[in-house]
Amino acid sequence: MPYPVPPSRLYPPRTAREVFRVRPLRLLEEAFRKSPGVVLAAGAGYGKTSLAAELPAVYVSLAEEAKDPAVFLWHLLAAYENRAELAPVGALLEAGAWPKALEALLEALAPLGAHYLVLDEAHRAESPGVVRVLQGLLRLPGLRLLVLSRKAAPFAFLTVLSERELAFDPEEACQLAKALAPELPAFEVERALSLVRGWPLGLRLVLLAMRKGLRPELALESAEGLLAYLGQALPKEVLDRASRLALLGEVDEEEGAFLLPYAEDLLLERREGRICFHPLVRSALKALLPEGEARGLLARAAEAALARGEGVRAAEFLLEAGRFGHAADLLLKEGEGWLARGLTYTVLRLLGHLPEGVRRGRAGLRFLEAEALRQAGRYREAEALYREALEAGEERAYLGLVRLFLDTVEPARAKPFLEEALRRFPGLARSLLAENLLNEGRAGEAEALGFSGPRLFLRQGRPAEALELLKRAEDPGLHRPPQNHREGSLLRALLECVAGDAEEGLRFAERGRFEAEALGSPFGLSLAEARKGHALLALGRLREAEASYRAALALSEGGPARLGVEALGGLAALGDDGAYREMVRLSRASGDLWVEGFLTLVVALARLRLGEEFPLGAFPAPDPFLEALARAYPFRDGWEEVLERYPFLAGRTLFAPPLARLRRALWRLGRLPVPYHPGVRVEVRALGGFEVRVEDRPVRFRREKARLLLALLTVRDWEKEDLLEALEATPGEFRVLWWEVVNALEPERPKGAPPYFLRTRPYGLNLEAPELYLDLRDPALPPLSPYRGLDHPVLDEAARAYLEERRRGLLQSPRPEDWLLALRLDPLDESALGRLRGTALYEKGLRLRLVAEAELEGD
């Protein structure tokens, strides 16, 4: 069921517009040229809404209920209705999945292109969640976001125009005076402007008071001053009736028609068949009502809101009326339904207004607040309140505690509460038991109890099926807050890293991070960073992976112990043995042996790709897939059947074997069109000295000429005669040198098999072989002089050419750091030093130049 957004909130008020404000409109346009978001931050009556009404914009006026980001998104959905296809967004909101709804909304609005969005009365909806939604909206290309607020904080990340910019200047004051009180002399208008210090609303009321012959000081300095003015400007019976209607904030035009003759004095705003009271006027008129009468009117307004199905609005009326017991009972009745619709922050806000005495007598409110805190990812607070609810006799708290430990994937902690829940609520607890069994790694028992879905397939060793199922799922677990893990984007990220493509895994990790940021969930942020680390690890971007894992670990501080497990596993994969031991300890303490086995193999494969065999020891094999990987490790000959069963191992995944061993397996399966594959990786490093490594082990040549031969092959392709001449070798000697190099690079090559890493006719390196790494072709490495220690004119010339090419490339870079590197290669280069002039690195460059000149003079 959609959240009811009053239509009057979607249209700006119809105002007289006596003054066309060219100056602030120009300031606004200049601000938008600098930033896609601008906030007009000023007190009531500074003309923020009137100024925004000059723009052709999508308009939304906000109330306190929009503090909840889900409610705020319902307002945006109503505002953009008929402008874009928003049905999927509404479906996500109805399912309570507002972070995903935000992402879907951004996708739906992207085709709209350039347009304005005005958010009026934004200070009333101020909350961290709404600020995160605004930050998400700024990702929309072409959006110009205008926020109207009584205060700049917390919207100061936007460009701010304040009261100083919005105050009337003398020219605007004269325009208003000509429209309202043309008989006033200019010096009286100047006096009025001075009295109100440029305040547009104050000036209006002062001018109206002066037109009636009243003292301008009565007009407005506070609500009391406004009341004094209204008391003289309106008949008493009108004032009395207006005070009753003002209490509601807005009424139908028909009901308030008697006020229209006094609209100017009452500052009434008319919006789509509704009459709205200015906040200052409402505050002043409300003071006229006896407390008892005001409470009665608000109680009747609550009843009317309930009859319209607007429970949240009814609760707000009851709270304003001071009928806290009635509001508490309404929360007990409707609160869990609101949580199911994703109105987490609405429930927390309403509960926060209840006095402790009212809450103390209702254990169900403790349970309701704990449920809301759990949905918000505030697990420690939620656990404390569940325990308080238990002590007060609320047995449903057993279910709540089980759900909490399912959220945090701590099956051992869930067990005792699950046993109690099964005794008291066998029907409801059965599905929770199934999920907890899954979290323990007992997938078969979980399935027997009816558990299904991608997580079951993953833990059954069917990751490819899990990924396909999740791709096809229309409702991937969205009905179950929190939505930042389990069957959502972060599970998709993990499955892509296991059985899909790590680039897609990275994309979904970033998407999951956005959702977690929107939710304000440190748990989700930590998990997103860990999944991002997994994707980067699979892609071989190891420094970035380490940064993500460390960020995940930092974000896990203060959260459930299980939260740091994936980050620790990632750091262990990069070589930290202490992190591996801690990962194992925490996995076992939480009771999740499957994740221990999963991450142990992530570590083993990552280390193997880095050239180190990781001892698996007594490996726990919790599913057939992980068991098959453990048997195949370290992926020498004989594991081809595993590759045929799990073909995704050949892709960019966490469990991909080293490229050389993978390609040898493909060759043995007849899928690689080469006559022979050695199954090793070769690194030829020429920068600085000259070194060759096979499977990360240094190669020792028996003959120095064989080493020189390989170095010459890195320079270019050779005809045999030219190569013999360069080596000063006879054909017989060359044959010996050639096979020494071949056998050094391919130590287990069968006799008669053609070389894989070397080519003949012409002679050279097989640079197309992905298992061959030549550092001369790596632009990320710093430019060092190659072939040091090898004395040969061809290599000397190649070194000079390499350095000159790198120098030219560095000078073409936009980065001053690269220009400094170019200057290091040639400290006397005027163009390199000239580029650095005006940058922070100029002094360093100048010192290089001076040192080089001093050395020349010394010579």
Image (tube, helix red, strand yellow):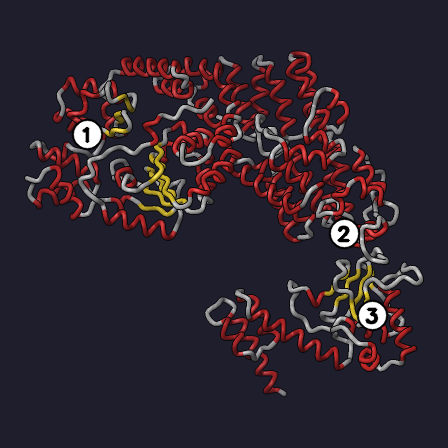
Residue appearing at x 78%, y 77% in the figure = 790
Which of pointers 1 and 2 indicates the residue nearer the eye? 2
- Relative depth, front residue between 672 and 206: 672
Question: Mark 1 highlights which residue?
Answer: 226
- Relative depth, front residue between 23 and 216: 23
Please state the horizontal and vertical placement of residue 687, each as a whole percent of the image. 71, 69
Question: Mark 2 highlights which residue?
Answer: 609
Alpha carbons under labels 1 and 3: distance apart: 97 Å
- Badge 1 or badge 2: first in the primary sequence: 1
Question: Mark 3 highlights which residue?
Answer: 760
Figure check: 23 above or below 358: below
Q: What residue type is labelled 2?
A: Arg
- Disc 1 is placed on an element classified as helix
Is residue 380 something one can see in this rendering? no
Q: Residue 740 carries which label?
A: none
Quarter the C terminus occupies: bottom right
Residue appearing at x 67%, y 46% in the figure = 502
Does 294 sit left or right of 85 as displayed?
A: left
Residue appearing at x 67%, y 73% in the figure = 802
Q: Do the residues labelled 1 and 2 touch (CB within 8 Å)?
A: no
- Residue 454: image quadrant is top right
Q: Which amino acid does label 3 sit on?
A: Thr
Residue appearing at x 60%, y 37% in the figure = 489
Please state the horizontal and vertical placement of residue 490, each as a whole percent of the image. 62, 37
